[in-house]
Image: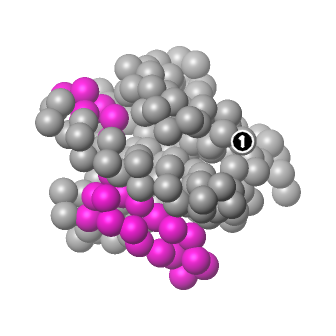
Amino acid sequence: MTLEQLASELQGCTRCGLSEGRNRIVFGSGNPRSRIMIIGEGPGRDEDEQGLPFVGKAGQLLDRILAAIQLTREDVYIGNVVKCRPPDNRVPTRMEAAACLPYLYKQIEMIQPQIIILLGSTALQNLIGPQARITKMRGQWLESKSGIKILPTFHPAAVLRDPSKRRPVWEDFQKIQEEYLKLEGKR
């Protein structure tokens, strides 16, 4: 199965109530052979309208952060925990996330990233554990059972709301750049 086939399989999904209010499923985008996968919470209004992840204000900030470490969204693969927009951009429920997680795990399996960046609490809690706290774990390297390096950091939307988070996110992305350069054999 390819990512395109998986995305096609997801069309028309009604596994949870989020399907009732969506315009488009936001499957993911970017380089399917990337060493880096970025995982956020779920689509917002702009993403729901365009069918692409991280295209609103938070996405524009993410693009600038990536550019600062010499990457573009074409160099990475970007996805979300849930594929449909929660009403009023609320946090997805555990049941909504559980309905989408098999698709996210399949994306991870197909892309085979060596680095996963978890943006925010929802991504962290759904991929690492419900007790995980972004304020305590951000900036710390974790490792999956399959050897993928995982780095949680604040979501760009949180940075837009609270500029004091800019510095920690910049430090986290410098760590990501360093690890990526090691993988690329440039260091």
Q: Position of residue 153 (x, y in %)?
A: 33, 51
Identified by mark 1, the residue type is Asn
Location of residue 151 by image quarter: bottom left
Residue 21 or residue 84, whichever sits in front = 84
Position of the C terminus, as image quadrant, is bottom right
The x, y position of residue 142, in whole percent, is 41, 72
The residue positioned 41% from the left and 55% from the top of the image is: 175
Mark 1 Cα-neighbour bin, 10 Å: few <14, some 14–19, many ≥20: some
Task: Residue at 66% x, 39% y: name it.
Answer: 75
Secondary element type, mark 1: loop
Measured as percent of width and height from the top left, residue 113 is found at 64, 60
Residue 29 lies, with reference to residue 49, above or below; the image says: below
Q: Residue at x 26, y 64 (%)?
A: 137
Residue 108 in the image: above or below residue 16: below
Which is more toward the observer, 177 or 10?
Answer: 177
- Left or right of 46? Residue 157 is left
User: Is residue 118 in view from this perspective?
Assistant: no
Is-magenta flag for residue 115? no
* Residue 155 among magenta residues: yes
Q: Residue furthest front?
A: 187
Numbered range of the magenta stretch: 137-161
Disc 1 marks which residue? 31
Q: Position of residue 184 (x, y in %)?
A: 68, 57
Q: Is residue 59 found left or right of 49 in the rendered image? A: left
In the displayed structure image, the side of residue 172 where residue 162 appears, left or right: left
In the picture as drawn, the residue positioned furthest to the right comes out as 1
**Quadrant of the rendered image containing residue 42:** top left
